[in-house]
Image (cartoon, rainbow, N blue to C red):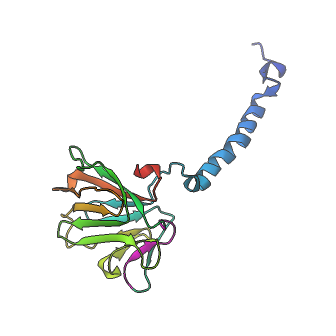
Amino acid sequence: MRQMSGDARRFFGLTLRHWVLLAAVLVGPAVAGAYWFGPLLGLPQEEPPIRVKNGSMLFELVKANEWVEEADKSGWSPRDGLDKGRWAVKVVSGAGHACPDGPTVTGNSIAITYSDNFPARIGPRQGGGKLKVGDKSGDFNKGPAAFQLRYPTANENGWIKEIRVTGGGGTWRPCTFTSRAQLVEIRLCDPGNPLCQ
């Protein structure tokens, strides 16, 4: 069987092995840069900064972040980020459901009401723009992971029944839900994050 010479396996003067090494050198730093600096540059991320999951009203940060209790026991704030004093909200509805004014809105005061009428208030902490969840920290349980914050319901049969967002300069009517199936999740981001647009 005829074998190809070393010269025959060259492309533009480089062997296949050299092309693979060159690609690794050029592409590797670009991938790493997008991973580490993408959020700072406003590039799409895999997860929004906060996801509010339906069922037991579970607030989840990205896994590298953590909920921190306010010193005065007035609620919980993310350790990192979400300090603009105003946030973008995206409602991801279930099949057949839609919010009356669309799924996205921006504001500085968010109220998420559970089916037992408990209101989870979200807004800037006193004296600063960092996001804070709750009126008192005892209304929520941190965990089981550090990036999770849960409203401790008596059972798992309830659901989020309403979200209101104000302080955005416009009118966005409350979005209501009559069953758990109507809401997949609520996303909270700093304005401009494509995951909340």
**Residue at the image point whose x is 78% and y is 17% from the top:** 3
In the drawing, does residue 38 fall left or right of residue 78? right
Secondary structure, magenta segment, majority class: loop
The answer to whether 90 is drawn above or below residue 11 in the figure is below
| Image quarter of residue 105 | bottom left
Decide which of 106, 54 is in the foreground and name it. Answer: 106
In the drawing, does residue 97 fall left or right of residue 37? left
Horizontal and vertical percent position of residue 44: 50, 48
Which residue is at the far front?
Answer: 169
Horizontal and vertical percent position of residue 49: 45, 60
Region in magenta: 73-83
Tell me if residue 25 can be seen: yes
Assess whether residue 75 is covered by the magenta stretch: yes
Horizontal and vertical percent position of residue 64: 51, 64
**Residue at the image point whose x is 47% and y is 63% from the top:** 63
Which residue is at the far bottom?
Answer: 72
Decide which of 174, 194 is in the foreground and name it. Answer: 174
Horizontal and vertical percent position of residue 46: 48, 51
Assess whether residue 49 is covered by the magenta stretch: no
| Image quarter of residue 146 | bottom left
Tell me if residue 150 can be seen: no
Which residue is at the far top?
Answer: 2
The answer to whether 175 is drawn above or below residue 115 in the figure is above
**Residue at the image point whose x is 32% and y is 82% from the top:** 138
Decide which of 22, 42 is in the foreground and name it. Answer: 42
Decide which of 48, 10 is in the foreground and name it. Answer: 48
In the drawing, does residue 150 fall left or right of residue 35? left
Count of all numbered marks drawn on residues in the image: 0
